[in-house]
Image (spheres, helix red, strand yellow):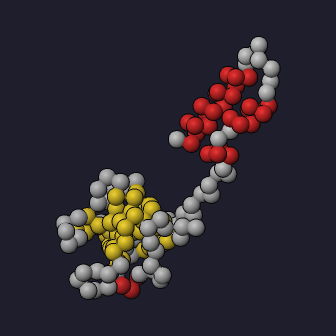
Amino acid sequence: MRRRKLALGLFAVALGGCSADRAEDTTARRQAVTREEARPASRPQPQPKPSHCPPDLSNCKTTSGRIIYVERVDPDGDGDAHFVLLSRDPITLPGLSVIDVEKSRRPSPLPGPGDRMSAAGPVYSGSYGQRQIEAIELHVARAR
């Protein structure tokens, strides 16, 4: 969207500058730059290290993406944490992957929405019948 606005703004400035009967007005050109275009480009988000499956584990999958939901307290009381990631790997649903992290593997402090995560592990059915990765390897990159 930002690129489209920038392209339209530059097109309008260029079109206005092409008129032969109009004198160049640098002040008008400066005013054509919107606040959106004047902002510096946002910094890229840090990416977690990729997680890998052991070669001898046949049901193992990997995924990575941005965390959109965290279940910090597991209802069954075993101390697991669950994460829902926006990811390109359709583990649970197209565009979504659920990661189950047992208590001993929970990162401290627990990451939250906006942070990025990569995970690897066997895929099993969760308590609601959803496909999820039971993480045996996990990496987190905190949002800035």
Q: Is residue 93 visible?
A: yes
Residue 5 placed where, x, y %?
58, 37
Q: Is residue 142 left or right of residue 70?
A: right
Q: Residue furthest top?
A: 21
Residue 66 placed where, x, y %?
45, 62
Q: Nearer the viewer, residue 118 or 4?
A: 4
Q: Is residue 116 left or right of residue 122?
A: right
Q: Is residue 105 left or right of residue 142?
A: left
Q: Is residue 51 visible?
A: no
The residue lying at 23 percent from left, 83 percent from top is: 76
Residue 125 placed where, x, y %?
22, 68
Locate residue 6: give its quadrant: top right
The residue lying at 49 percent from left, 71 percent from top is: 140
Screen quadrant of the C terminus: bottom right
Q: Nearer the viewer, residue 5 or 70?
A: 5
The residue lying at 63 percent from left, 33 percent from top is: 9
Q: Nearer the viewer, residue 1 or 92?
A: 1
The residue lying at 44 percent from left, 72 percent from top is: 112
Q: Nearer the viewer, residue 17 or 51?
A: 17
Number of marks drawn: 0
Q: Is residue 43 left or right of residue 111?
A: right
